[in-house]
Each structure stands twice: as C-alpha cells, then as structure tokens.
Amino acid sequence: MTRLEYRKLLQQTLNDIDLDSVGLMTEIFLQARENGSRIYTMGNGGSAANASHAAGDFLKGASFGLEKRFNIICLNDNIPSLMAIANDIGWDDIFIEPLRNFLKPDDVVIGISGSGNSKNILKAINFTKEIGAKSIGMTGFDGGELKKVCDLSIHSPAMDMEIAEDVHMAVFNMVKKEVMSVLMPENASMGETYDNRIMK
C-alpha cells in the first residue's frame, strides 16, 4: 500500500465512522465524570498505546482546571502487575484480574482490539457485563466478538490494523474535544482549549 492509498483509506474510514456512536461515547464519559465513576481503558500492542494515550489525555487535558475531574485508568500501564499476572496466571487474565479488585457497577470499561477477538479483552468485557458496568468496544476489520458483546461499539470499518489504530485514537480525540466544549465552554467560544493555553 502506498502513502496515497493509505491516506485515501484512512479518510474514507473516518468518513464512515458512526458519529452517533461517538456521541454516545461522549455522553458516557460525561456521565461517568458526573457520577464520580471510574473509566478503564485496555488494549494490546498499538491498542495498548492508544489506551494509555487516551487515559493521559483525560487525566490532564480534559480535566485541567476542573474541580470535578475524569477518573480514568489504563489497565496496561502497570507493567509489573501485568507481567506477574501473565506469568503466574495467564495472558488471558491480565485485564480481568485488576478489574476483579476495582470494578464497580457504575464504572466504564473500554476494550480496544483491532480484530475484536483478543481473548484478554473479551474476558474482561464479559466480566464487566457480569458486574453490570458499562462496556465500550473499539474494533476494526469485521468487529469480531467484541463488537457483538459490548454495550457500545465504536467500529473502524476497514480491513487494516493500522487504520483501526489511527481511527480509534481519532475517536478518543473527538470525545475529548467534545467533552471539553461542554465542560469548558468559555474556552470553546474563544476557539481555544486548555491544552493550547498550557502550551503558551
């Protein structure tokens, strides 16, 4: 695939994203903040990087200056715990085990899997449903099993892993920008975000 073909596929896939679903994701984030609920993100490989990136964005950029902030944790950021669970229990349990410690019914769990079939993601999402917490699945390709079992599906409809990873991060950024426009309207009206103000 050439760079021009990649750009064309990325643009087309972004255009095909269901913005109503992204809007629902924004509402879930705002409600979780209002309730003081915790949001968990998780993924493998590039999806792990997106999970970590998104958590950082909401801890700082979407929370800076607010009295009530986003309570968000990336499950794949605690490397010692992750490696201990993988070694002593099994790779499929690296996300469900910390959720067994912390997850409450009002929380939100976001599983990111390009294929939609990552066993450790599915195991954690199924546990999330057992607890009664809200689940969001971010997928690519045909969505796999994750698209079927999660409460809200954010699907990148392209048969390409890198496109899915790019689209998932773009969706997180959409949600971040939208919640900031709701929570910080004085900055949105000036065409300015807290991130921009910090950088000055």
Image: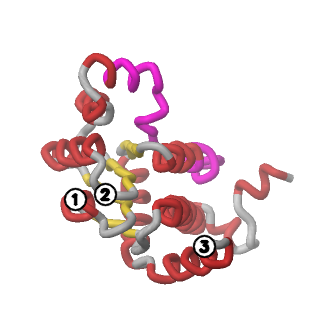
Name the residue beneath numbered marker 1: 145
| Residue 134 rendering spot, x and y as whole percentages | 26, 54
* Mark 2 or 1, nearer chain start: 2
Residue 69 seen in the current view: no
Q: Which mark is residue 172?
A: none
Query: Pointer 1: residues within 10 angstroms few (<14), some, or many (20+)?
Result: some
Residue drawn at x 62%, y 45% as measured from the top left: 60
Q: Quadrant of residue 141?
A: bottom left
Q: Which mark is residue 6?
A: 3
| Labels 3, 1: front one | 3
Which one is earlier in the sequence, the residue at label 2 or at label 3?
Answer: 3
Q: Is residue 178 magenta?
A: no
Task: Kindly identify the amino acid type of the residue bearing the numbered disc 2.
Answer: Gly
- The tag on residue 116 is 2
Around disc 2, counting alpha carbons within 10 Å, would you say few (fewer than 14), some (14 to 19), or many (20 or more)? many
Where in the figure is residue 73, as x and y percent of width and height?
A: 45, 38
Its colouring scheme is: secondary structure
Look at label 1 and name its amino acid: Glu
